[in-house]
Image (cartoon, grey):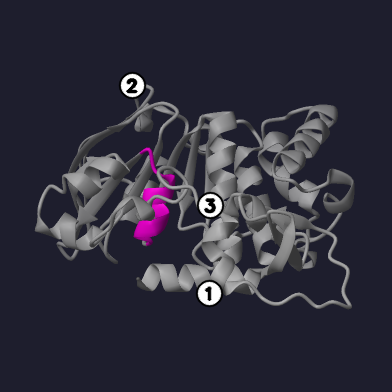
Amino acid sequence: MIRFQNVTKEYEDGVKAVDSLTIEIKEGEFFVFIGPSGCGKTTTLKMINRLIDSTRGETYIKEKNIHEYNIHELRWNIGYVLQQIALFPHMTIEENIAIVPELKKWSREKVSKRVDELLEMVGLDPETFKKRKPGELSGGQQQRIGVIRALAADPDIILMDEPFSALDPISREKLQHDIADLQKRIRKTIVFVTHDMQEALALGDRIGIMQDGRLIQADTPENLIKNPANDFVKEFIGSRGPETLPFKEKEIFIKDLTGKLEQADPAFEYTKVMDTETRLDEAIKELAVTDAIAIEQNGNPIGILTSKTIVRYLAEREGA
């Protein structure tokens, strides 16, 4: 789908941001580039849609050199999601999502139908959200709009440059779950850049670890952990086991947090109740729309789960 052949990006001062990169990203693959700051991961991403042109080497999409595509059509057919979100503040959510379809001269009816479809896909009611402005949405909601705007014209490729790094831990974890679930349904080719190893291991079908502009190892999360190519990869991943792969290898349940639950307020009537055997990702989705969940074990109430509970759990888990 996307093939780099001995691609190098060298600046006038002699610095090689990317050095002799050769790799193929398969159709429908969720591929993650990760590495230390300045390793060349974002430069690599931007060379796909020609925001940055390579100095040497060739890049192909569907076996056609990217320089043979009309640059505007190339970019219209590649969705792009940034950390900064970059929604137009003076435009409604509907207008933001519709930008590329309108540039491609879709009919008004087709555009409207696509906007509704995409909002529903990420759990945002079209009638509630499409006439709002970005400033009326939370950070997590804005980032969801950024993702579906990239999907609006149904591109084959989505580029995502650290899209969740500015969000709070709960919003970030929920969006990681959402994008993983979304990919199962849409099967796009996604190239994702992150500095967070936990995020890379959780999301990537394959992960490319870069150092000083070079691709050191590209492999599945499982193989990176079990068979690191060298000491740099081993140290970069750290001492990680199956618990590093929360969405793929190890399911986390509410029962794993029972020692951290808060006491229930007897004067408050909780609208949502979950059992300790419920998966944590289901609770995270619910906490996006409610403040607290009453938790039961064998039918008996044992405490309250809130966003703060999960933040504390994740912080301790990361530090373990």
Tag 3 or tag 2, which sits nearer the N-term? 2
Q: Is residue 127 left or right of residue 66?
A: right
Q: Residue at x 56, y 49 (%)?
A: 177
Label the magenta part by its dominant secondary structure.
helix
Check residue 204 for magenta coloring.
yes
Q: Secondary structure at mark 3?
A: helix
Tag 1 or tag 2, which sits nearer the N-term? 2
* Amino acid of disc 3: Gln
Task: Calculate the distance from the C-alpha at mark 1 to the C-alpha at mark 3.
Answer: 18 Å
Q: Is residue 66 left or right of residue 117?
A: left
Q: Bounds of the magenta span?
A: 196-205
Task: Calculate the distance from the C-alpha at mark 2 to the C-alpha at mark 3.
Answer: 31 Å
In the picture shown, does residue 4 fall above or below 27? Answer: below
Q: Residue at x 89, y 46 (%)?
A: 127
**Which residue is nearer to you in this view: 45 or 244?**
244
- The N terminus lies in quadrant: top left
- The C terminus lies in quadrant: bottom left
Q: Position of residue 58 (x, y in %)?
A: 25, 34
Dot label at residue 312: 1
Q: How many C-alpha atoms fall within 10 Å of the one at disc 1: few (<14), some, or many (≥20)?
A: some
**Which residue is nearer to you in this view: 154 or 88?**
154
Q: How many C-alpha atoms fall within 10 Å of the one at disc 3: few (<14), some, or many (≥20)?
A: some
Check residue 33 for magenta coloring.
no
Mark toward the viewer: 2 or 3: 3
Q: Position of residue 298 (x, y in %)?
A: 68, 54
Residue at mark 3: 176
